[in-house]
Amino acid sequence: MQSLTLRATLHHHQRRALLKASRRGGKGGRTMVVVSSSMASSFPSSRTTGPSKSSSSSFFPSSSIGVSQRRALLTKATFYPKSSSSSSSSSSSSSSSSSAARKVSARAESSSSSSSLSTFAPEAETSTTRRTRLKRVLSGVQPTGSIHLGNYFGAIKNYVKLQDEHDAYYCVVDLHAITAGGHSPKELEESTRKSAAIYLAAGVSPDKASVFVQSHVAAHSELCWLLNCVSPIGWLEKMIQFKEKARKQGEDVSVGLLDYPVLMAADILLYNADLVPVGEDQRQHLELTRDIAGRFNNLYGGNKWKKRGKNEKSPSGRYRGKDVLIVPEAFTPKSGGRVMSLTDGSAKMSKSNPAEGSRINVLDSPDVIAQKIKRCKTDAVEGMSYDDERPEAKNLLTMYELCTGMSREEVLNECASMRWGEFKPALTEVVVNHLKPIQERYEEIMSEEGYLDSVLEQGAVRANEVAEKTCADVRDAMGFVHRKSRYPSM
Ligand code: TYM
């Protein structure tokens, strides 16, 4: 049995190569991927509560190594680390003298060294690499207000789940956060950093996923503009979220708010995302993204694209003649896709609700959580049930289920006979216990100067590399003149 040691210093290209090798292991003797014991651990979840399942496979776990240690590792794994890749490849080979291990190391090294930071030199993506590449995931949360249990269970928890088996990109969508108009610059800055720290505290690993700030990748704004010009205004006017918000804002409603879904489409399409983890409220925006991608491909893809260039290949190195943009799928959890308000079981939990008591924020203290649950809306029925006629009971039982990781049946076995007076303290306990390790890691991350910035910088570099390629293909397909210095070979 061959043994490869995964090191936290590996760049995700290298990790991908190692994972592929481990999957192919069956053919020539089994290959086992071993997580180095100094890295392997799980979150300190002593009870059934806490995000233990999703995080146990994390090999950048904050509980086993301190933030400073992680930061040191992260700094070592500098962007496209020629030097660190060679050191990691030598350590891989030393941990196993097998030729398979050496091949993997060599592939990992060549893939990392083919990336370039300072100049845009597109790495050719052939039809084979496209077919075999890991599925890609992209998602984001707006840095407005506080991240609540709806954002966490509807989206962020799935970021953590999906990062193990996917090429993951998670951004804080600060450009979206200003679409409501009249934002506070100070709050935007604070909330952007806070949101990124919550991703990490919840278990998103910078070693598995690229975590970045949307405005750090200029291609989001550029692609939004290009897509604006293929998106009929009627499609945007039909968006439920636009209609609801526009109704509240009256004449002050900004062009940005109408354009919000096109920017979201740009976020997704830039990364050729296959999957987009979102709550149910975003499914309509995902449908629109699919429509925009389809329309773009019809207008400029396929044979029309093929005829655009003298060379067979596009600026990013893909063959012209296919779809320019990949049509994505939404990934919505069965439980948690729509967490409801504490004060009205028929309305979704939302950051924009002026009633603070309507939501539980991920960073709320135990006392605040207890107060909010104590005051939440109930009904006059005895006992607890997942009954559509009892939206509050159904919502709070679902919350119990999500915080404990129990099945519906298990929750009912435990709680069906409880009265509200008994259920509320039990719910408080599981919510507090679930959020405790996240809050502790959040504090650790925020207190470590420079750590968050280095993660965001690394994420932006990786994201820019992918986004620039897609944008270059889109410009190419639409007929924009190539800038010579950018594509010397064209
Ligand atoms: P935002 O910040 O409003 O919401 C972030 C994520 O949280 C989900 N969500 C919920 N899920 C379950 N129950 C709730 N009560 C609840 N409230 C919110 C949202 O569905 C979302 O997944 N438009 C996006 C931000 C965005 C985006 C993107 C997402 C911009 N570009 C590209 C994915 C891909 C939004 O709703 O943010």
Image (spheres, rainbow, N blue to C red):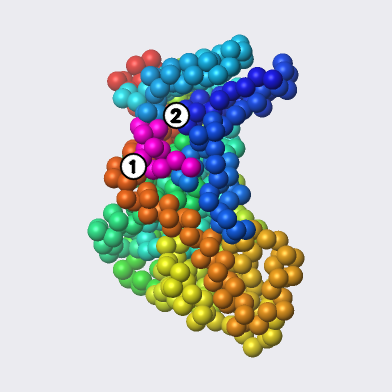
> How many numbered marks appear?
2
Determine the residue positioned at 58% across, 41% down.
Answer: 57
Q: Amino acid at mark 2?
A: Thr
Residue beneath label 1, please?
451
Q: Amino acid at mark 1?
A: Tyr
Q: Secondary structure at mark 2?
A: loop
Q: Nearer the viewer, residue 129 or 3?
A: 3
**Magenta stretch in the rendered image:** 64-75
In the image, is residue 222 above or below residue 1?
A: below
Magenta stretch contains residue 486: no
**Residue 23 occupies which quadrant of the picture?**
top right
Q: Nearer the viewer, residue 375 or 226?
A: 375
**Whole-Å distance between the Cαs marked 2 and 1?**
15 Å
Q: Residue 296: x percent and y percent?
A: 50, 40
Q: Residue 203: x percent and y percent?
A: 50, 48
- The dominant secondary structure in magenta is helix
Residue beneath label 2, please?
9
Magenta stretch contains residue 68: yes
Determine the residue positioned at 62% across, 55% down.
Answer: 333
